[in-house]
Amino acid sequence: MMTRKKWLPYLAKKLVIFLVSVLALSIIVFAVSRLSPRDPLVSYYGERTEKMSPAERQQTMERLGLNAPLTTQYVRWLEGALRGEFGISYKYKQDVLDVIAARIGNTLLLGLPGFILTFVLALLLGLVCAWREDSWLDKIISKAGTVLSCVPEFWLSLVLILFFSVIWRLLPSSGAYTIGRENDIGDRLRHLVLPMSVMILSHLWYYAYSQWESGEGYNRYITAELETFRKAAWKRQILRRFDARDAIRVLDVGTGPGFFACILSEEGLEVTAIDQSAGMLEKARENAAKLGVHPTFMHMNVNQMDFLDESFDVIVNRNVTSTLQYPEKLYAEFKRVLKPGGMLLIYDANWHAHLYDPELMKKVRAREEAHFRKYGTREVVTEDNPEFLATCPMTRYKRPEWDERVLTDLGFILNFL
């Protein structure tokens, strides 16, 4: 765990990054809006601008501060923003804070229930997919979710408006309520249906996949490993590379149901385990509790770890890079958080290469048939999600050649075993 002495500079660094990011974003947005070819007076006064004389235009520009250099305009705006004065909205002719205050209620009314419904429905879909894994229902939900996740929100909005508002005339196409019926709860709910449907359908599969990925199937496999000879075999494989009696801090990246975290904690090592799936971490905590060990589990983006530089002596990961869109970022993060002279242990393979190699696919199918003849059950590996895997570059890279090149460029000394 980080001590207070380490946490303070870490938090200070994050705060500085946040403030610099906000400042940079404000400069970019301000500059783009000011450099727009559209006349700002037209935005503010509309068609009346055409009737202004040159003297009136000049006077108006000076009154609004638009004649000053761009840097001066930004400094004035920033000074006002720091006092809580964000200026006047050219579109609404009102104070910016008044414009925000008038609309924040509708935003929260749509956003909060939408988020809750998305999470609840995603949880239910994830449980159904895990419960009926590889069934026709699981496959239909998976395919439908993949299609929905690829549909742009604006296009989905137009389709729903076309059918439900234009053709069937069942729901309103816009607005928060019908004019004159702002206190009618039923009318407000009708206006929420279409925008909330778009919000839920556009994000549902992402969260459902996270829950499905949390996975009963994978957890059953890991639980079985913890109860067989594989547990001892993995311990020997990892522990022979360093002296476990030393005070070693281990980072398990992409821990899943916590296999590495559990077996290394049993050896008395200080283990921190991270994963992007909250569902997986719940399974990992359950497995750790069964074994009576206490690794630290953290929900975290593996490509942007919230750890100080040079924090760990050993990093282990298993079958992680093959599922990432930017695996080189992960390796760069490994380099950052690993102590000088530390050890990186990667256990991975050319997973799913058969989807892009016809000859390898034939071998995989032959192995499936041999498994069926011997055991009477089919262990199908050709029904993976090709749409998702197509976004993962490691599916098509030849390994370990790719890993060797990237890790060498980062300064690692390699030892393939």
Image: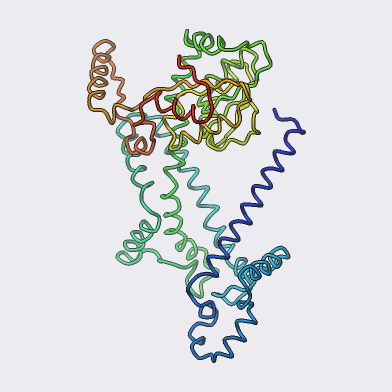
Position in image of residue 192 (x %, y %)? 47, 60
The front one of 313 and 237 is: 313
Q: Is residue 295 visible?
A: no
The front one of 145 and 235 is: 235
Look at the image and tell me in which quarter the N terminus lies. Answer: top right
The front one of 416 and 109 is: 416
Question: Residue at 47% of width from left, 14% of height from top?
Answer: 225
Q: How many marks?
A: 0
Q: Is residue 313 visible?
A: yes
Residue 37 to residue 340: above or below: below
Report the residue that reaches farthest toward the right.
Answer: 5
Question: Residue at 59% of width from left, 77% of height from top?
Answer: 93
Q: Quadrant of residue 252?
A: top right
Q: How is the image coloured?
A: rainbow
Look at the image and tell me in which quarter the C terminus lies. Answer: top left
Position in image of residue 86 (x %, y %)? 65, 68
Residue 97 to residue 114: above or below: below
Position in image of residue 311 (x %, y %)? 65, 28
Q: Quadrant of residue 164?
A: bottom left
Residue 358 to residue 264: above or below: below
Question: Residue at 52% of width from left, 63% of height from top?
Answer: 185
Question: Residue at 35% of width from left, 42% of height from top?
Answer: 146
Position in image of residue 358 (x %, y %)? 23, 27
